[in-house]
Image: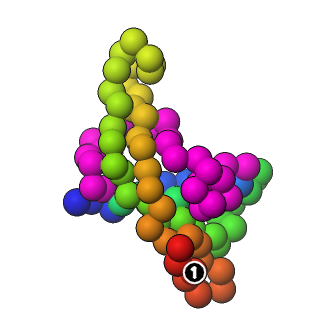
């Protein structure tokens, strides 16, 4: 199991944190595996981190050239912890 620190735009962050968005399309430059943890760091429109995070676990990986661009995968995800605000972590 590997933990990957990644950025996520504000417009998608709360949908992931509230379990409404259950998949991520990502370039597979990190050799993602089922069971890996993604720590999604929210970024604002300027690309700066907001301090909010959401930890998710990869439950399935779709790697299919018919549906995805070359090198990209769809990661099915499940929320492990919601976000960090002022050094307090809030769990689901």
User: In the image shown, does 89 or 46 lie closer to the viewer?
Assistant: 89
Q: Can you say whether 58 is above or below 92 in the image?
A: above
Residue under label 1, please give it: 90
Say which residue appears at 60% left-offset and 61% top-offset: 17
Say which residue appears at 46% left-offset and 37% top-offset: 26
Residue 69 image offset from top left, x and y in percent: 45, 19
Callout 1 crowding tier (Cα within 10 Å): few <14, some 14–19, many ≥20: few
The image quarter containing residue 76 is top left
Q: Tell me the quarter of the image containing the N terminus.
A: bottom left
Task: Indicate left or right for 12 with 56 as reference.
Answer: right
Say which residue appears at 55% left-offset and 82% top-offset: 89
Q: Can you say whether 52 is above or below 28 in the image?
A: below
**SS class of the residue under badge 1?**
strand
62 is within the stretch colored magenta = no
User: In the image shown, does 80 or 68 lie closer to the viewer?
Assistant: 80
Say which residue appears at 59% left-offset and 87% top-offset: 88
The span shown in magenta is 11-36
Residue 19 image offset from top left, x and y in percent: 57, 56
Residue 71 image offset from top left, x and y in percent: 37, 26
User: In the image shown, does 57 or 70 lie closer to the viewer?
Assistant: 57
Q: Can you say whether 27 is above or below 19 in the image?
A: above
Residue 43 image offset from top left, x and y in percent: 67, 57
């Amino acid at each position: 199991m590997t933990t990957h620190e990644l950025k996520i735009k504000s417009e998608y962050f709360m949908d992931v944190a509230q379990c409404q968005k259950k998949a991520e399309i990502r370039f597979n430059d990190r050799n993602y595996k089922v069971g890996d943890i993604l720590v999604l760091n929210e970024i604002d429109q300027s690309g700066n981190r907001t301090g909010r995070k959401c930890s998710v676990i990869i439950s399935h990986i779709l790697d299919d050239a018919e549906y995805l661009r070359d090198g990209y995968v769809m990661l099915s995800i499940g929320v492990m912890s919601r976000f960090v605000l002022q050094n307090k972590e809030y769990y689901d």
